[in-house]
Amino acid sequence: MSGVTLEKFSYDNKIVKYFGAATLIWGLAGMLIGVLAATQLFLPEANLGNPYTTYGRIRPLHTNAVIFAFVGNAIFAGIYYSMPRLLKAPMWNKTLSWFNFWGWQLIILSAVITLPLGLTTSKEYAELEWPIDIAIAVVWVSFGANMIGTLLTRREKHMYVAIWFYLASFVTIAVLHIFNSLALPVSFFKSYSAYAGVQDALVQWWYGHNAVAFFLTTPFLGLMYYFLPKAANRPVYSYKLSIVHFWSLIFIYIWAGPHHLLYTALPEWAQVLGVAFSVMLIAPSWGGMVNGLLTLRGAWDKVRVDPVLKFMVVAVTAYGMATFEGPLLSLKSVNAIAHYTDWIVAHVHIGGLGWNGFLTFGMLYWLWPRMWKTNLYSVRLANTHFWLGTLGILFYALPMYVAALTQSLMWKEFSDMGRLAYPNFLETVIQIVPMYMLRAIGGLLYLSGAIIMVYNLIKTAGQGIFVEEEMDEAPALAKYQSQAGEYWHRAWERKPIFFTLMATVAILIGGIVEIIPTILVKSNVPTISSVQPYTPLELQGRDLYIANGCVGCHSQMIRPFRSETERYGEYSKAGEFVYDRPFLWGSKRTGPDLHRIGGKYPDSWHYHHMVDPRSMSPGSLMPPYPWMSTNTLSHDDIGAKIRTLQKLGVPYPEGYDEIARADLEKQADQVVENLKGAGIEVAPNSEVVALIAYLQRLGTDINKETADLPIR
Amino acid sequence: MQKEILRTIENVEIYPLISLIIFVLFFIGMFWWVVRVDQKYIDHMKQLPMNEEHQKTSDHETNKN
């Protein structure tokens, strides 16, 4: 390479340090909130006696904090470190880097403020309201622009596989986020989903499933393909396998998505081909895991002593376990048992604590000494962290599996008489309370380990000198001359913009084949003539149900199993949800399903149950909501809400927004009257009145004659 | 339940079929390419994360000895 002038440039370590520090701070916060939420599941009093720190609101705070704050900042830290080095060029635009950093932290901060206040869309992992959604889109696009700018100014001709993963993650998350967040605002803090019922559920889980793939998996695979070889000081075991891994993961979603939804509609030959491929598809994920582990071949002696490698080995193993369990859970028979139970909670925590958490820890333990040009302050503390973390994962996951199986089997057990063996839902909950306690201990162990890490890293930074800009030099990128016999793929990955476009096309094809049937669904949901829009008071009650995160513990979806129809009543029909914006099917039953709760108990039962659940159900784990009987609603927004819903196509009569308030007050007076009959005095504009109206409406429409309905 | 509704859409099976065929064809093409790809290219790519410390990047395409 003689005669080539080397260009000097530097890598920005400061931005990596900031993202790394944010990872640590938000990580501790997110885990602490997790432990608090876990504690409330056996000790409801741990809600600290106010709505802001009660389970329904801090559960989404926990998931948002660990996914978007902890994992998100870790992704940025890893990418801002590895990408410039792999491309031999600093990040394209420093202003954009800092905009990315501060923008992201502000978004998280606004989540920390709005979620406890109950400002939420209640769609899982997409809870934040529309102004924050727009901010997320802007910051995310600035991050993508910075990556693409760096690619255009690079000095290394080829893009290493890690960068493919980064690019695909960026593009896909942008598409998913925008489509799933479509909503019509009522006010600055409230919006209604652009989709309703079944369609909303399909879009939400299209988002939910793929967001797990492209936020928690692909960016981390990119980080694995960079940091694992660096830490082991040997190149990745098989680069070819990593290419197969990448393209199969990207394309898996175009096949697996519709496959989950419409498998049974396929012709025979396609089903056979489909099954063959589903089995084959475990191969790329496992190929990725094996690739990671085999990178350590001949270096296992290092794994014994190097905490960085220990963390990474467990992370990669957890990835393998979670990606094996995932397809297993999608099998109809397994799903029938696992759905709504703690199995899903265990599954996501194997991924979250094991894969994301441990890979992040490994990466930070590797980065810190390098950026401060020193050694790790204490290897012993890092090893302690490793063991605490590993024990934490075990103490978390194992009790959850036991709890899930125990409870699920109890739900489904019938006595010799052909009746439910455990007709009282609460019995099945009380049975697993010890498991919930063990789980909280697991979380606490994991958190303690993380605290030790923070101490260790602060000490490491203290003993070294931070290198803000790391110098490097490389020749400029020569103008490319095409060579005969070159394959298309190599040409592609030399053209980053084109490559990004192709990856976008790949995921868009997947998106389109999944989304078109979803759009067609709307006109295919059989309408039930007796199902009518919510009355204004019920709508207010429903929005309270959303604001308090009731959906975190209660499903509204009775499956057509005998064990469910015996317990809850008639199974849920698609046509019953056409006015549900957003849908509230839920994904976990810590409490019973509520879809047929309407009319099951008198208003007074609900009043007492909300104020003190244990007065009605001794031993209940539901937190008390005494403030709901004293907090009042102004109802000033009801007109705007009705107008917004009308725009979305809900058939309220024209001009109904003007008289909605009067209707609301009439219904509220009726509830107050009912409660008075049971000796309860409550103001008609109190929260509990609206909530009772909503709960009493739930699932009752199918039994009604059309003429009885409140709004016509 | 979603499945039942989706199934009522006319010709809905065409969507998973399209996705399956695109995926199978792409997968076979990609696999064929990976098997046949130039080993030098693979070696170069493998080394990318490793050769940061020594700045002289070896370029397998211009350095065909």
Image (spheres, coloured by chain):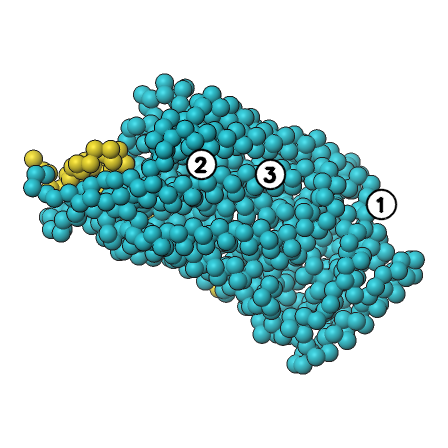
Is A526 or A540 nearer to us in this picture?
A540
Identify the residue shown where x is 49% and y is 39%: A24
Classify mark 1: helix, strand or loop. helix
Q: Could you tell me how far apart the alpha carbons at marks 2 and 3 are, in whole angstroms?
A: 17 Å
Number of residue marks:
3
**Callout 1 amino acid:** Ser
> Which residue is the site of mark 2?
A360
Q: Tag 2, which chain? A: A
Q: Could you tell me how far apart the alpha carbons at marks 3 and 1 are, in whole angstroms?
A: 30 Å
> Which residue is the site of mark 1?
A615
Q: Tag 1, which chain? A: A
Give the x, y percent position of residue A244: 31, 41
Is A603 or A95 nearer to us in this picture?
A95
Image quadrant occupied by the C terminus of chain A: bottom right
Identify the residue shown where x is 41% and y is 19%: A304
Classify mark 3: helix, strand or loop. helix
Specify the colour of chain B.
yellow
Task: Identify the disc placed on residue A32.
Answer: 3
A292 lies left or right of A597: left
Chain coloured cyan: which letter? A
Give the label, 3 or 1, closer to the camera. Answer: 3
A451 lies left or right of A586: left
In terms of sequence position, does the residue under pointer 2 or pointer 1 come before the other?
2
Mark 2 surroundings within 10 Å by alpha-carbon count, few (fewer than 14), some (14 through 19), many (20 or more): many
